[in-house]
Image (spheres, grey):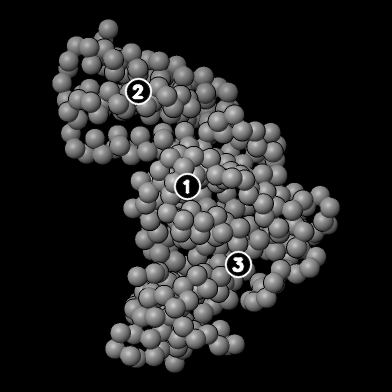
Amino acid sequence: MDIREVHNEAMYKAELGDIQKYMRNLDAAQNLYEEAYELEKSVALSALEKQLGEPTISILLKSAASLAMRCELNRDAEKLIGLALSGEPPRDIAEELRNMLETVNFRRHLDLKGIVLQEDEVQLVIAGRGVGYGYAKSDDVLNRVETFQKMAVRTIERKAGRVFRKAGSIPGELKNACQPYISAPNAASMAFRMKFGSLASTTLAGFSRFEEVIEDINDNIELIGKGDLAAVRRNIVDDSYFSNFIGLTKQLAPDGENVNLFGITSITQGKERMVQLTSHKSEISSIIKHAEIIAMTDDDKKKNLIETNHENIIGILSAADNLGKVRITTNKGEKIMISVPDGLSDIVKNYWEEEVSIIFQSKGRKKVLLDIDKV
């Protein structure tokens, strides 16, 4: 076997598969990926057998594993990654292999494992080093489940054309559609099934099926993961709903310690869709800092905002008033009032009486909250 020649052929077929996928010829793309995988796997195993040395072996095994993942052959990918890591791959390639293995494991966690989702259900998965077999820190899991419920409720209200609700309970006509139900968690990855009160018996302008709500959430989370905030802005025009969605997405995001994966599995028109949120909270924070810039159309205003330094303070969050302000008491006893935009009210509520780190921007004499984290 001429390893270089067969490898080049595999890469050529993979590129053809990418072209077919771009053209939405998904069956043709899948066939080409499978052909490319078989060729690349034979090359990688041949290199391993002939002991061609590093980094050749690990690079070829990594390439074959990547193609296996495109073919959704996750067990094959797991084996190939294991073979590569069992050798002595260079440090950077070993790190890439470990990242790939996390993705493979994540897909395994997302696997329905015999559970058949209905089209009005969604499965939420929380996985990471802090999630054991059937056990996890309650805050890591329950807070994210609650946050997803808030996100779904806000999406229902937005799609129903409601003005952003600053306070108070869900309007009566929406209550049936906004009642969440969750299953007992599955072990290992903490997977929950969730559904909301049936929309079939509730007539709402803008949408009629719960799947539309989940698709909206999935689309925008994927865009945030890609850093495409402008596209999210086109989908969510209202300022309050826009900042609310980004803030809630940050609450769902991995902390990089106990949780490194948050996943959503749904069924739409009979097809399964899996969405992975792997962006760290700090990455979402970086997006939040630029959210206001995206909303502006005046180039001079954008320039001025970019040049304005965001300020940071640490202190205890307390004392809200009816004008949408909260008080931060610093370690030095200084009391600072911060204005909370409507869209961030859901997020701020999670931090009452907690020590927090706040990023704000001064607009004249007013200090406006941009981002908040627990210390």
Query: Among all residues in the image, which is located at the extreme top?
Result: 1
The residues tagged by marks 3 and 1 sit, at their Cα atoms, a distance apart of: 25 Å
Q: Residue at x 56, y 70 (%)?
A: 346
Name the mark on residue 79.
2
Q: Quadrant of the C terminus?
A: bottom left
Which of disc 1 and disc 2 is earlier in sequence? 2
Q: Is residue 364 above or below residue 101?
A: below
Q: Is residue 97 left or right of residue 353?
A: left
Q: Is residue 92 left or right of residue 137?
A: left
Q: Nearer the viewer, mark 3 or mark 1?
A: 1
Q: Residue at x 39, y 80 (%)?
A: 316
The residues tagged by marks 3 and 2 sit, at their Cα atoms, a distance apart of: 44 Å
Q: Quadrant of residue 329?
A: bottom left
Amino acid under label 2?
Lys
Q: Quadrant of residue 303?
A: bottom left
Which of disc 2 and disc 3 is earlier in sequence? 2
User: Residue 258: x and y, percent?
Assistant: 37, 51
The residues tagged by marks 2 and 1 sit, at their Cα atoms, a distance apart of: 24 Å
Amino acid under label 1?
Ile
Q: Which residue is mark 1?
A: 126
User: Residue 62: x and y, percent?
Assistant: 31, 28
Q: Is residue 146 above or below residue 27?
A: below
Q: Is residue 344 visible?
A: no
Q: Which residue is mark 3?
A: 241
Q: Are marks 2 and 1 in contact (CB under 8 Å)?
A: no
User: Residue 52: x and y, percent?
Assistant: 17, 17
Q: Secondary structure at mark 3?
A: helix
